[in-house]
Amino acid sequence: MRSTDTEQLAESIAAVAVAWREPDHPERERAVEQTLALESNTFTEEAVAFAINQQMALITARSLSRWIQGRRPRSRLTVGVLNAGNIPMVELQDFLAVVLTGHRYVGHVSSRSPALLPAFAADVSAHHGSLDAEFVTADELFKRVDAVIATGRDETAQWVHEQAAAHAIPEHRRLVRGHGFAVAVLDGEEADEDYEHLAEDALLHEGLGCRNVAIVWAPKDLAPDAFMDALARFRAVFPAHESTPRRLKMQQAFLAAVNAPHAYGEGLEFLISKGEPEAQQPGHIRWVEYSDVTDIRPWLDQHHHQVQLLTARPAVIEALRTGLHGSDHPFSIEPLGSAQRPPLGWCPGGIDTIEFLTQLQ
Amino acid sequence: MHHQAGGVNTGDGAIEGIADRLFRLEDGGATHEFAELAELIVGYQRERNPVYGRYCKAIGDFGEQLFPYLPIAAFKESPVTCYPPEQAERVFESSGTGSGRPSRHYVRDLRLYERAIDEHFRRVFGEAPFVLAAHLPHYAEMGSRSSLLYMVDYIRVQMAVLGSRSFLEEPERLSDFIELSEQNGVPLVVIGAAFGLLQLVEHHPCQLPANALVIETGGMKTYRREINRTDLHERLAAGFGVDRGRIYSEYGMCELLSQCYTRGDEIFLPPPWMRIQVLDPEDPFREVDEGKVGVLAVLDLANIHTVSPILTEDRAVRIGDGFAVLGRLSGAELRGCNFLLENV
């Protein structure tokens, strides 16, 4: 793809993104309706709107150009993407990365979110005149592609590698990302606004997603009351999916059974417990106490493959950066309130997707 | 469906009597007898086991679950018993490969465990005797804390001929057991951890007699990479030179006194005193349809003095009265970062 072609495509994508910023844009409206009608996901109307608005606000011709930085692959290949569909529009970044680097996109969308990305892609195709992108089943995908991108646990990774090998896709053409979660670090100086940001980081999308804050590190004597209040305020704006209280009920009963300190919101719209630094089920936030912020480093060293993102106030980030200096941590470090707002250039698992795509040959 | 224990004698004497009734249950036997025993035992546990009592009180409505299933992680957090835990005859521990902290099962009466082993093993594998060759790497160092070692040793002492033993230290000596089997005119049973048996056939391939049985007891993750049960059975059958129908699997864990076995296929069948359900991981009060992937819940009535309804952390599908195990539930699945969830 020549640079002018990329620029034209970026402009088409940006124009479609502008249209998609409007909730009543017909293609968006239809895709959202289809998505919310499904029983296979736990998306709420408010969370879907948030995800689309957030992603569309990022997309301008300029931001796309800054992200791609003129990088182009030596050869044009067909790249298959196996999408998780666990949160709305999570598929967009890989789609944009593939088409903007000039490869052909062949995607498999999850039954949990089969409508949003195909509708956006169709809109881009209509606006641009054509677009080398299509959606197929997972089995069909491997027959058609030269390279593959997927995310999942170890067994999934193994399955992808086996399928890829069976279809003669060499190892250097496979990007198989691991999974993970985010952690937040507090220092007790947080304002109400910081706690509101953290509430969004932890509760949006019902705790699903690999950037979701699952563990909150807090100084030993810090009471979680202010955070609890922020969680309740967040739930007033973003009500929980109807399945969330049922899912959290068993965990709340478990905590009661083993006498573990915990608290929960009215109607079990969120659950927070004190204990070991272990990620709990989505929507259940683990509050972990530390005596000194440096105590967290050994845990981060040990769990850096699972941690996708560390979020904290700028002052805490600064203290942690000093502490983490020289360590080879693949996770991002971003301010509170960033978890559900990944930038275009976010590198899941520390891997730059554009770099992978441009190195393909 | 809700069940209330109410109004039964839950004294220890009544519970002793229940154990006898429990092990007299037959495969496919009267469901009302099972239901009556389950009500009695779980009612007793709700009353006497403080952890389970608190759990039931907090859970309230338990939807489509037979009884409220206590998440298995409770065994890592505190003693889960209907009696003072210091009165336990033995404490079995998990190997702690998951989160690092081991589960502890406080067994009040080892006779219950032995009866659960004995009754079901004989039903599945026939009456003894046979030659038993055991290969259980990594469990040996757990010693008396390993419920699997206890089980295998019990089977060896009660059902196997003299000369049956572990051959962990000398894997090349498997041929000795073949000879022993021929001399005694009884079948050979090789029992071992999945990864250990795979390594064994890779390094010391041998031809077992056609009537030999191989029972793998799980532990596939510790192998160089995880493999599925179909591949495992095929490799073991090829490596031991036996028909695939001679390869069995055992499903057990330190928190359960009962075991389930496959019978030449990949479907685990529970003993008559055990029931299973497969629940929706995203809504654990809902049972998923047969053939759909979910999280395995077991009702093991042999766990009389601890807790019978347990929610495991295993992914499974229900097939008739049995189940196939697909691996462990992982954080990736719970957070949805896994495109395969719907496709497994």
Image: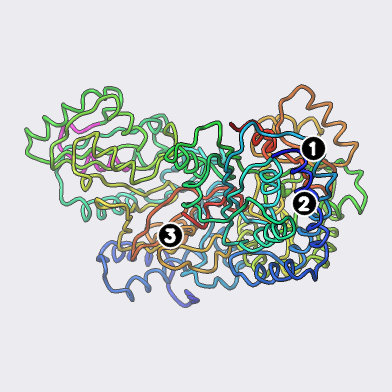
Instruction: Please name the residue shown 20% across and 28% down the image.
Output: B174
Can residue A206 be seen in this snapshot? no
The residue that disc 1 covers is: A333
In the rendered structure, the answer to whether residue A272 lies left or right of residue B47 reads: right
The residue that disc 2 covers is: A340
Q: Which residues are magenta?
A: B151-165
Mark 2 belongs to chain: A
Q: CA distance from mark 1 to mark 2?
A: 13 Å
Q: Quadrant of the N terminus of chain A?
A: top right
Looking at the rendered structure, whether the residues under marks 3 and 1 are on a common chain is answered as no
Q: CA distance from mark 3 to mark 2?
A: 37 Å
| Element marked by disc 2 | loop
Q: Quadrant of residue A77?
A: top right
Looking at the rendered structure, whether the residues under marks 1 and 2 are on a common chain is answered as yes
Q: CA distance from mark 3 to mark 1?
A: 42 Å
Q: How far from the left and from the top, in percent, is residue A146?
A: 53, 40
Mark 1 belongs to chain: A
Q: How far from the left and from the top, in percent, is residue A231?
A: 81, 59
Callout 2 amino acid: Gln
Q: Quadrant of the C terminus of chain A?
A: top right
| Element marked by disc 3 | strand
Callout 3 amino acid: Val
* Residue closest to the eye, A295 or B267: B267
